[in-house]
Amino acid sequence: MKIKYLYILFLYFCSLVSYAQNLKGTIKNQVGEGLAFANIVVLNSSKGTVSDKEGNFSLNLSEGNYQISVSAVGYSSKLQSITFSEVHANHDIVLDENTQTLGEVVVTANKREEDIVKVATSVTSLSAKKLEDTRTWGLGGLTALVPNYTYQELGVPFQQVQSIRGIQVFSENPAVSTYIDDVNNIDILANGFAFTDIERVEVLRGPQGTLFGRNAMGGVINIITKQPSNKTTGFAEVGAGNLGLQRHSLGFKTPIIKDKLFFGVNGLFQTQDGYWKNDTTGTGATDRSANGKTVGGEKNLYGNMYLKWLPTQRLSLTLNLKGQRDWSNNTGFFVSQADRDLALANPDKINLARVGSHERNILNASLVAKYFADKFTITSISAYQTIDLSFKDIDFPGFYHSFYKSAIGEKLPPQEVYSQELRINSNSDSKLQYTAGFYGFSQVGYEPSTNLAFELAPNAYSIFRNKSDNFGLAGFGELSYQITDKLKATVGLRYDYEKREATFNGFGDASFIGGVFTQTKPDTTVSGNYSALSPKVALSYAVNDRSNIYLTYTRGFRAGGVNAQKVPNNIRQTFDPEYSNNYEAGYKTFLADKKLSIGASAFLIQWNDLQFFNLVAPFTYARENVGNAQSAGLELEISAIPVKGLQLDGSFGLNQTEYKSFSLKRVNFGTGAETSTAIGGNSLSNAPSHTLFLGAQYEYAISKKLKVVIRGEVRNIGSYYTDIQNKIQQPSYTLINSRIGFSYDTYSLFFWGQNLNNERYLAFGNPDSSFGRSVRTAAPRTFGVTVSAKF
């Protein structure tokens, strides 16, 4: 009997051995030398490793079909397919130098790791190297680098307008959704994280409502930071430049227990002076020290920490904490120059009676759990975010200060967001692929423009307060079916439900006089319920293994809500969602033995029920659904390596936009006179007619370890209007950037310059010129040096 049990146990052990085999191989260069410390990752799994000093690696895999991504410093990344019959064999994988061929790109646009060529969406993927080469330190660096993408900001990175294909808005609910390591920055106040130690940035152009939900009307910015692995690595970087720039960062990653537990941490400190000199002439300033002050400087302190645990080969747990503090005692927050023409004539001057201050603190905490079964992956993303903000002496004009209950310039109560996503993805090679899941969030917010004290006289203030309490649930699913070897169909649907509630007071209902808060009327609470369906349909045809044609229809929406000030009885206290419908055709390919890549698309977006602020009573703004708009255009991205060492990159976006027939009504509350402005036929605000990027980089190896790099860029942004009335125009402008330096082994020294031609243009303009033509000029020529070391 014992022999029988031993025999059964032996058979079971043999089945386990046949079930899990070691995939072994060597990563080599073109001359057959082993490449040490290459990263080998099995897509859509927790499995990965690093090659040893001879380039050898080993992975424990079950029988099946796999996609493996291989990358190494100085070499082009490569995607390798491994089939069932090959698992038992050794595999030599050869990488080309990145000065000879273009790397193959993996993206997560469909919430799974895929070859970018096979994704039926317009996606720009910017690798860590590309971000470094282009000196992209924040979202503003994406302008023109990504076709039909532009960025404007109102003094600080957490008050910005991102525009993709002309779809944009200045509101706490953005029209472009930003994700960092799978976590959605629901509110505009959560943006502005500094870029450091980034793995890649993916920009999905066009509505992405099906998988990404609310506020993805124009597209999605998906930021992925570098995570720790089995290789101990670190870096330190020191930078300095004009306008008092200092930018210093460092990071460290290491395995605590090989193949099991990993730790990573990085941080950044950055400071830069403003470029405006304040002139108090004509402002009635009583503080003489404000005259001649520099305005617009800011300091930033950022930290990011990872702890990753693989308790089993199938389970992955990643804890991430990110925090950033931004502060200034000469803030550019919400201040502007009074007139466009005067600003462009004197771009380095601003007229403020006082120079204000601000401070923002943000903390993101997330836990990502993934379970990798043989044919599917289950992912759970739990996140918590808290933001607090204070500001004082903001000359808008008039003086504004943060306030909630006790002190002028106090920190507002923290905005808190809890979110949870649970989804399942197929990860087999079946003809049918699927993604399905649920998403929920809870948000308590204190929007800065409606939680403030407006100064009536010294020690006398009119108080505006607003607390929002929002809740949302969504269910989504997407199916893809491989109809033939070349033809694939995809359908998807998402249902979103939101309940939004606001508690606020009206103009004159509360005051803070002589240090005493008085409320003459009780706060008002208003709520609204909103829902939206976001479908998706796509067809893609694989011309060959490295070329794909696709047609897609996608839909996006931006949540409705509650106006956070009391409005007259004839005005709605709530407003409805707005929607965008996107029709797109595209083509992606790698040609000439991976020395040339092309991505092209044509699109039409119909934007319905767009939301816009109207002045409906003295000091009272209401957001209303005012009408429809349309955006159509073409996009092209090309990268090429014509000769060894020389890489050429280009992107072009053409965008024709139009507001449809509607009018804006304005009332002069002094005279009672009403005016109406026809908007139909105007171009969308902040939507350039085109964007153009041309970049050339030449790398020359002086020796095996010493390399010189020379880079030049031209960015041209077509003319556009900042306002819906098309009265504040920014003519077409061109920026010339350069970067020159040396790298020796793991050390580098680079000199860089941005806007070397010193073009003066608008960084922001009033979106509604009926309230004035105030603008902000952009930074002048900047230049500096960066020294870095890696290990």
Image (cartoon, rainbow, N blue to C red):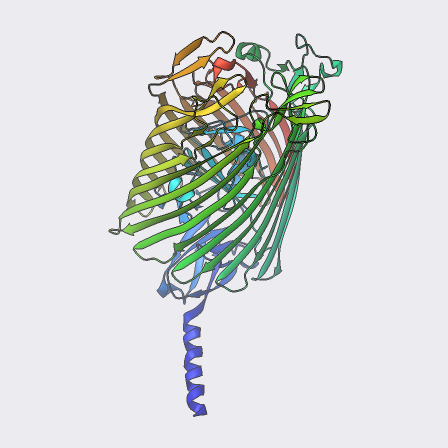
Query: Which residue is at a point 32% across and 50% down the rendered structure image?
Result: 479
Return the x and y of residue 501 as percentages of the image width and height: 50, 36
Based on the displayed image, in which of its 4 quarters is residue 149 positioned?
A: top left
Query: Residue at horizontal 53%, vertical 41%?
Result: 443
Is 386 located above or below residue 166 in the figure?
below
- Residue 113 visible within the image: no
State the image coordinates of residue 178 (x, y, percent, origin top left).
49, 38
Instruction: Left or right? Give the position of 597 relative to 189.
Output: left
509, above or below 219, in the image: above
Observer-nearest residue: 109 or 185? 185
The correct choice, above or below, for 649 with respect to 277 in the image is below
**Residue 522 visible in rendering:** yes
Q: Residue furthest left?
A: 484
Assign the N terminus to one quadrant of the image.
bottom left
Q: Residue at x 44, y 57 (%)?
A: 378
Residue 23, image x and y in percent? 45, 64
- Residue 243 sits in quarter: top right
Give the total of numbered labels. Answer: 0
